[in-house]
Image (cartoon, rainbow, N blue to C red):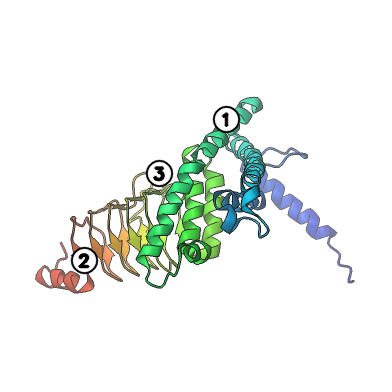
Amino acid sequence: MASFNVTGVVHALDGIRSAWRDSQRRAREPDAREFPSRNAVAEAVEALKGVLFPMRLGPVDLHHTSENFYVGYTLDAALNSLLTQAHLELRYASRLEPADDALLQARAFGAIDRFAQMLPEIRRQLDHDVLAAYGGDPAATSVDEVLLCYPGVLALIHHRLAHPLYTLGLPLLARIIAELAHSQTGIDIHPGARIGDSFFIDHGTGVVIGETAVIGNRVRIYQAVTLGAKRFATDAEGHLEKGGLRHPVVEDDVVIYAGATILGRVTLGKGAVIGGNVWVTSSVPPGASITQANLRHALCTDPSGE
């Protein structure tokens, strides 16, 4: 095995880390981790998938007779792991205004306990999502195939877990969960997005759904659809202003075909159909059908585009 002279590299990296931590006002606690572990969150999410769907996403040797025991044991372990990560996130968030650690621990426990109570409703929502995918895709041969194979369903499992954590004041854990799905599926759903029942993402690669997007019930979208922001406001110093309602509202029963880009706080009315590869920056009335053809007609009759 070759021996490299790494001493200088180690010292140089230590100096860079120290400068970064000073610039970010980070604490230097030699025996404490500063923020959550992506790997620990990933393991907890995999466990929660088994809790939600034990006979399909749980261990290969699981039997119905031991299903409840497995769910109880696995859920307790996953929640305790998330509790540790939630405590780390709250400590990280309070680093500039230190808070009592016992209080942070209590807040973390309260958030994870409330999250646990939401799991039955999360499972109910996911059942509706699976049925929407099965009913909306003629290629689907069973609901089990949909759950096991469809990237849109995998992304929704992650989102249904991430969104409650986001609303409970744990946005970093939520974002990690969302990005785990993004890296596996190419579907980027911000955990802040509000998504109703029976949501179906067909194919899915390249789908982007922004933080403040609101999606109603029975909505169907295809690959490469973007529900994004039209522009980003800046402050007097040129820095991006955080927050603000900047993403679309999609009402019930809307269909958005592949490659469509919907930008800004616009509303797609109930039952609207958005054709493939169109660019929408203004609201669409209920029941309307927007295609490249009728957009070209609108531009020809009004060359200003207004």
Q: Residues within 10 Å of mark 2 (few under 14, many from 20)?
A: some
Residue 2, position as x, y percentages in the image = 88, 71
Which image quadrant for residue 152?
Answer: bottom left
Which image quadrant for residue 258?
Answer: bottom left
Tell whether 139 sits left or right of 301: right
Does any portion of residue 112 appear in the rendered image?
Answer: yes
Tell whether 247 sits left or right of 293: right
- N-term-proximal mark, 3 vs 1: 1
Vertical arrangement, residue 86 with respect to residue 42, above or below:
above
Helix, strand or loop status at disc 2: strand
Does any portion of residue 201 appear in the rendered image?
Answer: no
- N-term-proximal mark, 2 vs 3: 3
- N-term-proximal mark, 1 vs 2: 1
* Residue underneath mark 3: 243
What amino acid is found at the position of numbered circle 2 in the picture?
Ile
Residue 184, position as x, y percentages in the image = 55, 64
Q: Pointer 2 and pointer 3: residues touching (CB < 8 Å)?
A: no
Return the mark for residue 107: 1
Vertical arrangement, residue 255 with respect to residue 78, above or below:
below
